[in-house]
Image (cartoon, grey):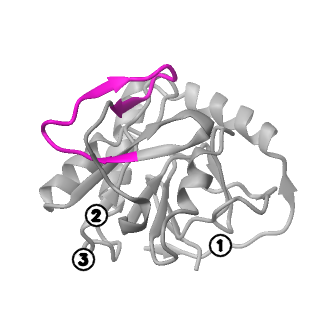
Amino acid sequence: MLFFVGTIASMDKSSLRAKYKTKRQALTDDLIEQKSLEIANQLLPLSIWSYTRFHLFLSSTKEREINTAYILTLLFGKDKEVVVPKMEKESQLTHFLLTDNTPIHINSFGIPEPKNGIPVDPSLLEVVFVPLLAFDSKGNRIGYGKGFYDRFLTQCTEDCIKIGLSFFPPESNLIDIEPTDVRLDYCVTPEKIYQFF
């Protein structure tokens, strides 16, 4: 079921980052796994499965992120091409096709990423799953503050579908946004799909 939401006030990003990092730390490992599986299952009714090329972040256990292994299994089960990011200097991401031969290592931030592989230009991506700490009723998101995804998403086409993944429902207050921030099309939680267009 899709939900359309709206509200008025606003809240600064640093306060929200602290709030949601604390909320994540309070989740047990079992609850993270359960909620991650529920999020993957929530994706099934979305109108995205006719697309071929999906971008998916690999989860950081250090940051207690959603376990995207469930989504990865879903994508491979549907014979989709999966592209994964690699963090570079200057807050830039490069992107590689994930295959059986793609070498994966843990970077200095504790995030699994490809060492190298078959590069994919962002303009070729059709669906991007976006990591976040929090989101609001307008589809604005808060990440970790480094700007990796905001820079990356501006390189995608306007038609590219941007799907946030969150353990928690939207903030009741609007998030302070900047001109460089890119809104989501959807955000998926364990309970609901939120749509922003």
Residues tagged 2 and 1 counted as in contact (Cβ below 8 A): no
The percent coordinates of residue 155 (x first, y second) are 53, 62
Label 2: which secondary element: strand
Give the residue pinned by disc 3. Answer: 50
Q: Is residue 105 left or right of residue 52?
A: right
Pick the front one: 44 or 113:
113
Q: Nearer the viewer, mark 3 or mark 2?
A: 2
Look at the image and give the residue range highlighted in magenta: 95-114
Q: Give the residue displayed 79% in from the left and 58% down from the top.
A: 178
Q: Is residue 104 magenta?
A: yes
Pointer 3 local density, CA inside 10 Å: few below 14, some 14–19, many at least 20: few
Tell me which amino acid carries mark 3. Answer: Ser
Say if 5 sits above or below 129 in the image: below
Residue denoted by label 1? 5
- Tell me the residue at 21%/54% (across/down): 74
Q: Is residue 140 left or right of residue 11?
A: left
The residue tagged 2 is 53
Residue 189, given in percent of the width and then of the height, sits at 48, 54
Quarter of the image for the N terminus: give it: bottom left
Give how far across and how far down residue 130 sits, in percent: 49, 53
The one of 190 and 152 positioned closer to us in this rendering: 152
